[in-house]
Amino acid sequence: MQDISLAELTEHIGTRVGSSRWYELTQDKIDVFADITEDWQYIHLDAEKAAQTPFGGTIAHGFLSLSMLSAMYYDAVPDIQGTTLGVNYGFDKIRFISPVRSGSKVRAHFDLTEMFEGRPNQITTKWHVTVEIEGQDKPALSAVWICLTYLAGA
């Protein structure tokens, strides 16, 4: 993906800038995430017990789906020309709408809602992000994500 100028990105405020490729959330990824975060709740790991829940099987951690945003962002959103560093500043809102069943594929859509220069050569962007589950009407999650981009000279 080619870099985009700051002026070009500004023209995209209020529009979809990009969508990521599909990412499969396999049971192996769910298991590894459980070990890393020490969240071993049975709905994520025990297929037999999870089958008895309203989910009908194991599901990905909501935070696993959320943590995929970085990879999805790199996949979908071009860098601003002159970027030296980009960091996660936080979220204004996160809602986990639908569970992601083990083996499902998800992708994110990035709509640029706001952009401003907070300090010289530091750009703040706000993104409305929707993570779609392949074949489902309701998304996995919806979030307002704030990112900081540092440009050369910062």
Image: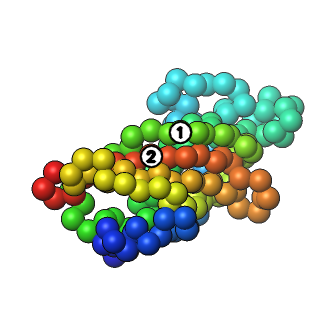
Viewed as shown, does residue 13 lie left or right of 49? left
Residue occupying image coordinates x 16% and y 51%: 154
**Residue 87 spot, x, y in % from top left:** 33, 46
Rendered view: 120 above or below 30: below
- The residue depicted at 86 percent of the width and 35 percent of the height is 54
Residue 89 position, x and y percent, is: 39, 40
Q: Residue type at mark 1: give it.
A: Asp
Distance of label 2 from label 1 (alpha carbons):
7 Å
- On the image, numbered disc 2 is attached to which residue? 146
Depth check: give the residue in front, 44 or 76: 76
What residue did someone put label 1 on?
Answer: 92
**Element under label 1?**
strand
**In-image side of 101 versus 146 (left or right):** right
Name the image quarter holding the N terminus.
bottom left
| Residue placed most toward the observer, 44 or 130 | 130
Q: Residues within 10 Å of mark 1 (few under 14, many from 20)?
A: few
Residue 142 at least partly seen: yes
Q: Secondary structure at mark 2?
A: strand
Label 2–label 1 contact, CB within 8 A: yes
Find residue 30 and report its horizontal and vertical position in percent.
59, 40
Asked if residue 121 lies left or right of residue 40, the reply is left
Residue located at (58% from left, 58% from top): 108
